[in-house]
Image (tube, rainbow, N blue to C red):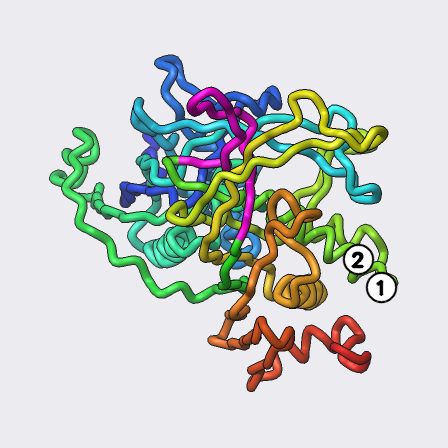
């Protein structure tokens, strides 16, 4: 009696992905150490294949849930995809950012709230492969794989940690290589790992589930101080946080300011505090692992062409005199500002709260960066443009000198969010 072994796959497709980080990338060890990045045995930074697979699977679960087990497998059956580690070059630029946890009620720093975040800089490049194994009658699954790659290229899928602080957005170029294993030439190429792939034109992204808020304007005096002092002549000053020679306003800083404003609006609307923590996330508590937010804030790149050093003094609050070693120097910038914030399209409450908070930023009701008490960080917003799925758009245009704005909302996008919040009938709404 003889038995015939059936092959588990007769067709293979390999996608070689060349990725360039458009925002910083955080890949950290599992022990929770935020001051180092994940490295291999050669001390080279890398992104684990399991991390890549997790990000791709999460998107597929939301958009094409019926394909999750087919592509990624489950506890009973393997999936059809194999995803490699992301390999970074040895000279990938690494940075460390100082961070501070703020108590949501008091607005002051939390005890032991200061920490640093190590990450790879925007502009670094890495490679990984996505390999599909199946049969010729299952080639339709490749449509979902390529939609997934389009979502990665379009920013709907981000990689690594610190995603809601704007990390992990990449743009990709893809080479596609097919192996027909029912033919001897295909089997030979597969066994010898021959790669004669052709450039893949990524398909139009069919599934868009995000609303993008783009805020453009100008800041006459914005300050984002770094942790390390810089020295010149016979004195020193604390300069602006910079990466790659470009001053930045971190997405986490923008997130903190907007979160505080959303909290105030939510209290005014008598919403539960957990609504805000659900939108912006929270740290671990009560034995859990914390909660990731749903709104994503990207870094703001600032111009360094218009900057000036300003020396100030510290006053003793008891005597009214100048403190010893009181003079210090800062370097506020005059810069154009563009904020890019994304929010789940299906969450009308989140979109409405964010709309109100950004409108208040445009009205000058709060600031970004350091030095708010002395007038730093006021943004002269020119426009808030809103882009939603199905090509729905709206726009708020500000006249900064008059302190008012006009609304273009022909499709009723903003009005729908306002109705969801129960607003629109109070004076000033």
**Percent x, y for residue 140?**
35, 58
> Which image quarter holds the N terminus?
top left
Quarter residue 163 falls in: top right
Image-based side of 239 in relation to 374, left or right: left
**Percent x, y for residue 40?**
40, 18
Instruction: Give the structural element (helix, strand or loop) at label 2.
Output: helix
Of the pair 118 and 338, the residue shown nearer to us: 338
Instruction: Let me know if residue 224 is in the magenta part.
Output: yes
Look at the image and give the residue range highlighted in magenta: 221-243
Instruction: Let me know if residue 211 is in the magenta part.
Output: no
Of the pair 310 and 252, the residue shown nearer to us: 310
> Which image quarter holds the C terminus?
bottom right
Q: Dot 2 corresponds to which residue?
A: 264
In the rendered image, is residue 164 in sight?
yes
Contact (Cβ within 8 Å) of mark 1 with mark 2: yes
Q: Bin the neighbour count of mark 2 within 10 Å (Cα to Cα): few under 14, some 14-19, many 20 and up.
A: some
> Residue extending furthest bottom?
410
User: Residue at the location (78% across, 62% down)?
Assistant: 265
Q: Dot 1 corresponds to which residue?
A: 268
Image-based side of 189 in relation to 244, left or right: left
């Amino acid at each position: 009696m003889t038995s015939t072994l059936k092959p588990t796959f007769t067709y293979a497709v390999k996608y070689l992905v060349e990725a360039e980080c458009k925002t910083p990338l955080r890949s950290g060890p599992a022990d929770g150490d935020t001051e180092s990045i994940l490295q291999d045995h050669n001390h080279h930074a890398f992104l684990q294949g399991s991390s890549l697979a997790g990000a791709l699977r999460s998107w597929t679960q939301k958009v094409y849930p019926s394909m999750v087990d087919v592509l990624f497998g489950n506890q009973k059956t393997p999936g059809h995809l194999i995803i490699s580690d992301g390999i970074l070059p040895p000279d990938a630029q690494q940075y460390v950012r100082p961070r501070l946890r703020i108590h949501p009620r008091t607005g002051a720093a939390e005890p032991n709230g200061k920490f640093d975040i190590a990450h790879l800089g925007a502009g670094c490049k890495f490679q990984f492969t996505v390999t599909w194994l199946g049969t010729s009658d299952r080639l339709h699954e490749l449509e979902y794989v390529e939609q997934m790659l389009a979502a990665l290229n379009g920013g709907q899928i981000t990689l690594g940690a610190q995603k809601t602080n704007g990390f992990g957005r990449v743009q990709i170029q893809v080479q596609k290589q097919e192996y027909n294993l029912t033919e001897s030439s295909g089997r030979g190429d597969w066994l010898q790992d021959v790669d004669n792939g052709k450039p893949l034109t990524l398909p139009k992204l069919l599934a868009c589930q995000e609303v993008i808020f783009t805020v453009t304007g100008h800041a006459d005096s914005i300050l984002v101080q770094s942790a390390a002092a810089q020295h010149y002549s016979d004195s020193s000053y604390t300069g602006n946080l910079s990466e790659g020679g470009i001053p930045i306003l971190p997405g986490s800083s923008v997130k903190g300011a907007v979160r505080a404003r959303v909290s105030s609006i939510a209290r005014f609307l008598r919403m539960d505090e957990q609504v805000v923590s659900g939108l912006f996330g929270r740290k671990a508590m009560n034995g859990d692992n914390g909660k990731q937010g749903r709104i994503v804030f990207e870094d703001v790149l600032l111009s360094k062409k218009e900057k000036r050093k300003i020396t100030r003094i510290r006053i003793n609050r008891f005597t009214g005199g100048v403190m010893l070693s009181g003079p210090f120097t800062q370097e506020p910038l005059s810069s154009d500002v563009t904020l890019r914030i994304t929010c789940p399209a299906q969450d009308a409450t989140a979109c409405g709260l964010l709309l109100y908070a950004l409108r208040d930023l445009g009205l000058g009701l709060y600031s970004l960066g350091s030095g708010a008490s002395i007038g730093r960080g006021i943004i002269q917003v020119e426009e808030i443009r809103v882009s939603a799925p199905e090509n729905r758009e709206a726009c708020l245009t500000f006249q900064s000198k008059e302190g008012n704005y006009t609304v273009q909302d022909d499709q009723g996008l903003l009005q729908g969010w306002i109705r969801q919040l129960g607003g629109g009938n109070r004076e000033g709404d």
